Every structure is written in structure tokens, then in C-alpha cells.
Amino acid sequence: MRIEILTFDGCPHGDATCEIVRQAVILEHADAAVDLIDVPSAQAAQHLRFLGSPSVRVNGEDAEPAARARTDYGLMCRTYHAGASLAGTPPIGLIRDAIRRALFEKR
């Protein structure tokens, strides 16, 4: 399994997202390569289909299923629903669900 964390330099939520992904991998007992991908420019954001920082992809699919149809690529901050509010990091449950989906598809 391959997990990508896409972010840009100076993202205030990049490190926390890396820790969330690390914890999710441990909790799901997943054999995963985790790659941090720097998105340096608006052109790279378009090329990488970057929905904002931080973004997490599991086996090439955005961890947030509802975001997969989005096309608003660019260098911007990304927010995630966390209960009744918004957060700058993805909830660990979102990442764990994405890992489980990937593990199930592998079978």
C-alpha cells in the first residue's frame, strides 16, 4: 500500500497530518509506504490534482471519498469536517477508513 501526503512548504498542518497518518497505519496494522510530496507551484498543483494542503491519498485515491470529484486544484489550505466544525487536518477515522478500503480491495 502506498500513502501520499501532499503539502506545500510552510503548511501549518503538514506535520500533524504526518503524525495522524503514522498513527492510522499503526492502528490498522498496515504495511504501507508513506511518501511526503511537496507541491511547489500552482502548475505542480494542477498536474498533481492537488486539492489543498494537506491532502492524503491511499493507493492514488483521495482519502476523503466526497472530494474525489472535485477539480478545484491549487496552492491553498484544505479543511476537513471534524464533527460540527472544520479542521486543518484530516480526522484519523477518515485515514483509517481509507486504509481499510485499500486493504479490502487488495483481497
Image (spheres, helix red, strand yellow):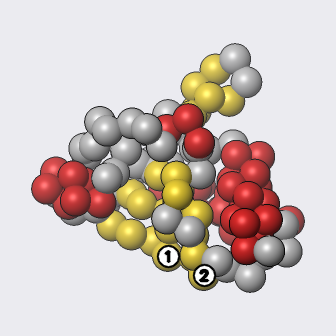
- Report if residue 77 is visible in the image: no
Q: Residue at x 21, y 52 (%)?
A: 46
- Residues 56 and 47: in front is 47
- Extreme residue in the top direction: 84
Residue at x 24% of width, y 54% of height: 45
**Quadrant of the rendering where the C terminus is positioned:** bottom right
Q: Is residue 38 above or below residue 93?
A: below
Residue matched to label 1: 35
State the quadrant of the N terminus.
Answer: bottom right
x and y percentages locating residue 96 in the rendered image = 76, 55
Q: Position of residue 22 (x, y in %)?
A: 69, 68
Helix, strand or loop at disc 2?
strand
Q: Where does the image place residue 44, in percent across and percent down from the top left?
A: 20, 60
Q: Residue at x 48, y 43 (%)?
A: 68
Task: Name the residue located 69 percent from the left edge and 55 percent from the top edge.
Answer: 98
Q: Is residue 5 above or below residue 83?
A: below
Q: Residues within 10 Å of mark 1 (few under 14, many from 20)?
A: some
The answer to whether the residue labelled 2 contacts the one labelled 1, judged by CB atoms less than 8 Å apart, is yes
